[in-house]
Amino acid sequence: MKNRLIIYSFLIGLFALGLSACNSPAEKKKFTIGFSQCTLGDSWRKTMQKEMERELAFHPEINFIIKDANLSSEKQIEQIQELIDQKVDLLLVSPNQAKPITAIVEKAYREGIPVIIIDRRTLSNNYTAFVGADNYKVGLNAGAFANALLKGNGNVVELEGDPAGSSATIDRHNGFTDFIKQHPGIKYLRHFNVDTEPWQEQLTEFLKTNPNIQLIFATNDRLAFSAYNVCKKMGVEQKISVVGVDGLPGDNEGIDLVDKGMLKATILYPTGGAEAIQTAANILENKPYEKEYNLATTIIDSTNVRIMKLQNQKLSALQHDIERSQQKIDEQKIITRNQTNIIYTISISLALALIMGLILFYYLKENKKINARLALQNEEILSQRNQLIELDKIAKEATEAKFHFYTNISHELRTPLTLILGPLEDILSSPKLQFSIKAPLEMVKKNTLRLLRLVNQLMDFRKIEHAKMHLRASENNLSAFVTEITNAFTETATKKHISYRVDIREADLKVWFDVNMLDKVLFNILSNAFKYTNDRGSITVTVYKDSSQTKAIILIEDSGVGMGPETLEHAFELFYQGNEGTFKGTGLGLALSKELVTLHHGTINVKSEKWKGTRFEITLPLGKAHLEENEIEKESNPYYLNYEEAKIYTNELENQPKSSTENIATGGKDYSILLIEDNNEIRSFLKDQLSKNYEIIEAENGNTGLNLAYEIVPDIIISDIMLPGKDGMAITETLKNDLRTSHIPIIILTAKGSMEHQIEGLRLNADAYIVKPFNLQYLEETIRSQIRNRETLKDHYSSELPSEGQKASSTKKIDRKFVSEFSAIIESNIGNENFGVDDICKEIGISRVQLYRKVKAVLGYNVNDYILTVRMQKAKYLLLNEDLSISEISYKVGFSSQAYFSTVFKSKFGVTPKAFKEKKTDN
Ligand code: FRU
């Protein structure tokens, strides 16, 4: 903002300077004067013009336009009109003839243009000023001279015109004749109109016939000179005196002709050029002026001609001097103008320099301020930086302290854990160990080892995080190493009936690796593979060199539960807990493995598909070019299996509780348990324990529990009795009496141990009743037994498909009712080709999900499969018992196409309906 102000003031300064330069006092307002001249063709007029120019030199403010009418009055009228149109400030007119020019001059005057009439007049008085000599007086002077010369007696003629009709001619004639008239001795014999007559011939003739003529008066010197020449031609020039008008200086002009004796006299008639310009300037500048500027006139004859001539010469010399001075003045003016320009330029430059200086000064001041501010900021930044360094130091120290803390606490934990493990293993290996405490002790051992593993992994991880763990690679046989580690899992494989294959493609595969790191990686991945592979699954380990011969590859593939896309994406993240249920998160193991492989400059990748299995690929670069000097172990020490490490990883696998659910399930968690328990601790304990094998849905009050039961139709419900909202008994009663949920086994879990409660529970059709504090194993066993019962029941229903089912008796009345209702609906619609799930839902009054779950739970069938099976059973029955054609039977069981019916029948029973019928007939 300030900068702009400075620039604006600078520009204003410049502008003012410029203005003052233009408005110098020498400069006046400009005027335009238009001059209409009747002719420029004779010396009198040229003299007038010169006089004007001389005067105009003193008036630079006047712009002078001159128009030559060339002795034509019409032309002069036109030109005056042009000057009016040009809006000249003042009009100068020397009329050619008085009468024709009068109107146009009046017009100009009326339009407000100041008009100066010069020399000749118009017929009007409407003009601003007149400059000129009195022509009548000129005529009188001429008359007086003639009278005096002829001493009152003689004969005269007059040459009149050039031009006729001009006021000069008219007035001179009048003056002359008026004077002559008063002197009767003087005879005016004739006048010649020079504009209209061949006057020279006429004059010659007249002089011949009138030899007594003594004087000729011509209205100007030009005519007078011509008259003299006529006389000379006739040889009478000495006898006849010629008098003219004008009296101009210069060769063969009036004065010279008088001096030479050719003219007797000339009446001085001044042009008034200078006076006209002076008058014009006064009018334009509103100064006083003479309206009638009368110029003096005089007679020039032999008596004064010399003086006149000398005066004129002097005047001419003076004039010359004046012109030279004028020229000098003009030159001086140019110099002065140039100097003025230089002064202006210098002044402007100085002003500019001053302004620039001011701006510079301002900026320097500002700069100083900015620098001071910057210095302050710099200081602040510096102090902040120091603070940051200090903070960083503190943070580093804190991190270091944390690391030490982790390391120490890990060590502290390892010692007691090892001390627990030693005696524990001793006890477990004792032959005297009571069978009843073996299982819990195994559990203690398993968890001790689990803790040990976690502590070890945590320590390793911290070491890597703090760059404290360095690769110590030595050249080893990777094949032998992998074999050694895989062997540690053979026993587990055997126990779990897992098909375990180790495929070593190259017996001696030399690879640079850190044995104490890579074994952790392999233990980790292998233990995972075993953990997530069900009994009778398969695990394969393959070791080989890749096709480019630059990498060694270890592949570990299993047919386990696999991971869904989301879990897979986060597989190598610390403690990632996916929400896919089956895969129990990765804990530390995979994250650590990845770090360890990365330290080897290798890669680890995983591919997995839910329920299909998992495949880990570890690649290690061959040779040691990729290793830094400090990553290479000088001495290579052979690898001996780290038994503790092996135990840590394998023990857990071997001691996994045998779960019958897993036998039933194809993928581990096929069953869901709805846990209705308001005590958070018990609920989360149960969830922790049971979620290994079951999908757990939690509800912390009775109402939520009941809603969830309808919503998800779980496989089992474990419910407390005392609950906020609906209590366990009410829930049991509701669910057991509802067709949609009646099949769900309900285990009542309560601190109330009284027999009445148990009886009440059982009366309400609870499937089991467990009293708190309960034995977890007992609970697990109860769950398994309930599931087994459900399966048996399912087999029971489904094996009796279709018609026998209705004969069968079931302990679960409501389920039996459901089965019979369900079967009846299907039976009565068996011939309806378009009959489907939606029809059943509508008839029974439950949702599709509930129907699916119910049929699956009670009959173990998919609804559509069940309908198809009923159709086929019916077809079989009809083939056996009725004498109907196959096409009729296919129609009766809801098939519009016999061919399709035959295909379905054959896929179900292994024979075509036709073959089946024939076989029956044979039997
Ligand atoms: C020139 C002239 C002069 C004369 C004047 C009169 O044009 O004829 O000789 O004195 O004009 O207006």
Image (cartoon, rainbow, N blue to C red):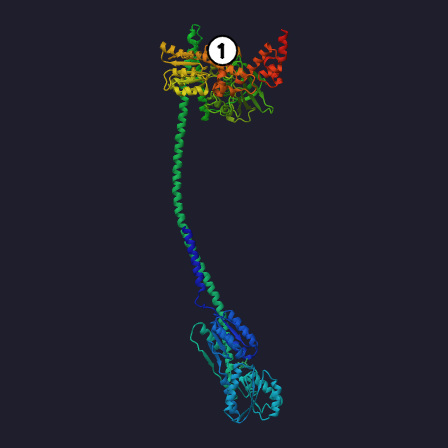
Q: Nearer the viewer, residue 416 or 710?
A: 710
Relative to 436, 891 lies left or right: right
Residue 656 seen: no
Q: Position of residue 666 (x, y in %)?
A: 52, 16
Q: Which residue is mark 1?
A: 792
Mark 1 crowdedness (10 Å alpha carbons): few <14, some 14-19, many ≥20: some
Q: Quadrant of ligand 1?
A: bottom right
How many numbered dots are placed on residues in this image?
Answer: 1
Name the kind of residue labelled 1 in the image: Thr
| Vertical placement of residue 17 versus 751, above or below | below
Q: Nearer the viewer, residue 473 or 775?
A: 775
**Mark 1: secondary structure:** helix
Q: Is mark 1 within 8 Å of ligand 1?
A: no
Q: Nearer the viewer, residue 322 or 480?
A: 322
Q: Position of residue 619 (x, y in %)?
A: 55, 23
| Vertical placement of residue 20 versus 145, above or below | above
Q: Nearer the viewer, residue 779 or 99?
A: 99
Residue 746 seen: yes
Q: Position of residue 226 (x, y in %)?
A: 59, 85
Q: Position of residue 207 (x, y in %)?
A: 60, 90
In the picture, which quadrant includes the C terminus?
top right
